[in-house]
């Protein structure tokens, strides 16, 4: 078992392939939280009323 064996992690690295022994990196997207506070919502509602 070593670099030539595709069932091992080292073999996957040497061959440049992926599989169960060497999964790909998972990139997770960061979801931005809503930054609207009560004060900001209040300002928006008063601005709409004044127009």
Image (tube, rainbow, N blue to C red):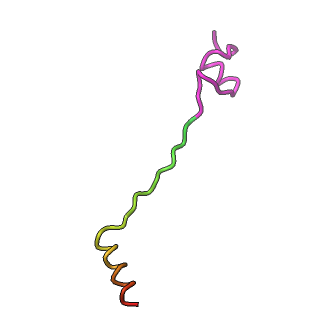
Q: Is residue 22 magenta?
A: yes
Secondary structure mostly taken by the magenta-highlighted segment of the chain: loop
Find residue 46 and report its horizontal and vertical position in percent: 33, 83
Dividing the image into 4 quarters, which one contains the C terminus?
Answer: bottom left
Indicate left or right for 37 with 22 as reference.
Answer: left
**Nearer to me, 35 or 14:** 35
3 relative to 45, above or below: above
What is the magenta range? 1-24
Q: Position of residue 48 (x, y in %)?
A: 39, 84
Q: Residue furthest front?
A: 49
Q: Is residue 51 above or below residue 4?
A: below
Q: Quadrant of the N terminus?
A: top right
Residue shown at 46%/53% (left/top)? Answer: 31
Instruction: Give the side of residue 39 with respect to residue 1, left or right.
Output: left
* Outermost residue, top side: 1
Q: Residue at x 37, y 64 (%)?
A: 35
Asked if residue 21 is among those painted magenta in the image, a careful observer would answer yes
Q: How far across and how far down the image is residue 45, in percent?
A: 35, 79
């Amino acid at each position: 078992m070593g670099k030539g064996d595709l069932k091992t992690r080292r073999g996957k690295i040497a061959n440049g392939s992926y599989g169960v022994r060497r999964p790909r990196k998972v990139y997770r997207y960061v979801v931005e939280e809503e930054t609207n506070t009560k004060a900001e919502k209040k300002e928006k509602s008063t601005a709409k009323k004044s127009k």
